[in-house]
Image (cartoon, rainbow, N blue to C red):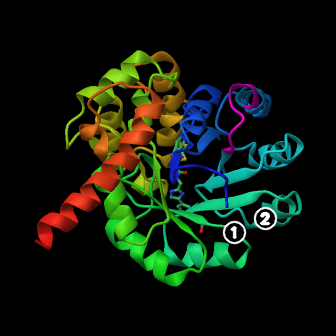
Amino acid sequence: MLGIKYPVFQGGMAWVADASLAAAVSNAGGLGLISSVNAGTEAVRNEIRKCKELTDKPFGVNIMLQAPNAAEIAQMVIEEGVKILTTGAGSPSQYMAAWKEAGIKVIPVVASVALALKMQAAGADAVVAEGAESGGHVGELHTMPLIPQIVDALDIPVIAAGGICDGRGAAAAFMLGADAIQVGTRFLVAEECTVHQEYKDKILKATDISTTVTGKTLGHPVRSLKTPFSKSFAKMEADPNVKPEEILSFGTGSLRKAVKEGDRNGSYMAGECAGMVRKAEPAKDIVEDLILGAEKVMKETLAARLA
Ligand code: TUI
């Protein structure tokens, strides 16, 4: 459907997923994605144009629907001839007709069966089903029960996301019925990923219990690394004297600060598998390890368990 060699999507991480990372993943045979969350609509347009120069392989754009410029981005991607879109943090129903008209493959990220069904009815070509192990904005269900329930409910392809970081996770996702996988956290340390070195170091140092979810009281739960920032955020949420608007303004700009400046007061969004990310390497090695690792573990497990 997408013209890619391997069923591996790179997560469209806000502020992180630029032309450099997306082109490297696409050149490796996966699907690179550029995030719409950047320094404005024209900055994203530039990344799309750069990506076209860096790769002749298919790539896409992820549209963060809660961003104030979402409608502008929705139009801009049509102008730039983008062929594949994923969307996150909301329902893209209002844009679907225009995108389909432009011949775009539309792949909403969903976190529940209800939204997945709604997206299929609205004409989605596939969905990314994202479990709460993911970094960034998360839903409630986790990957293990989410994927099979969405696979059973839908007729269109399902891409599994959330907690997938190596060949074992990829194999597990395929066993749950997923047609492809999406990986974010592991690509944070890819050589072609342009995040601040401090962000990469924090991922490389993370353990199994390094992430936490804040923002539930605001209706916008976000998974990130435990840092002084996440602790202050949680404290504000627990304090009945702090207004939601104050917490929101405390969080504003915090992801950009982490990604661009490695600021200690930044928000280091990351998935639960950060503790499994142990080395920086080219995006190509990550894509190949996911696929070859899945193949190896599936073969070996079958042989061992059925012996
Ligand atoms: O969108 C994401 N992950 C994100 S977006 C993001 S940007 C950000 N920047 C600053 C602060 C906070 C966030 C960081 N990470 N993933 C896709 C995703 N979408 N996961 C879950 C959902 C989702 C959840 C509820 C989609 C739809 C939904 O409800 C839709 C509705 O309105 O019915």
What is the three-letter code of the residue carrying label 2?
Met
The CA distance from mark 1 to mark 2 is: 8 Å
Residue 177 relative to residue 154: left or right? left
The percent position of residue 46, horizontal first and vertical second, equals 77, 26
Q: Which residue is mark 2?
A: 96
The percent position of residue 5, horizontal first and vertical second, equals 57, 49
User: Quick one: SS at disc 2?
Assistant: helix
Which residue, as the protein is rendered here, is positioned at the far bottom? Answer: 153
The percent position of residue 196, horizontal first and vertical second, equals 46, 18
* Ligand 1 falls in quadrant: bottom right
Give the magenta-colored segment's residue range: 52-60
At a point 43% along the width and 78% down the height, the residue shown is 149
| Residue placed most toward the observer, 250 or 122 | 122
Residue 118 relative to residue 114: left or right? right
Q: Is residue 216 a member of the stretch shown in magenta?
A: no
Q: Is residue 54 visible?
A: yes
Q: Quadrant of the C terminus?
A: bottom left
Q: Which residue is mark 1?
A: 124
What is the three-letter code of the residue carrying label 1?
Ala
At a point 54% along the width and 31% down the height, the residue shown is 16
Front label number (1 vs 2): 1
- Disc 1 and disc 2 in contact, CB within 8 angstroms: yes
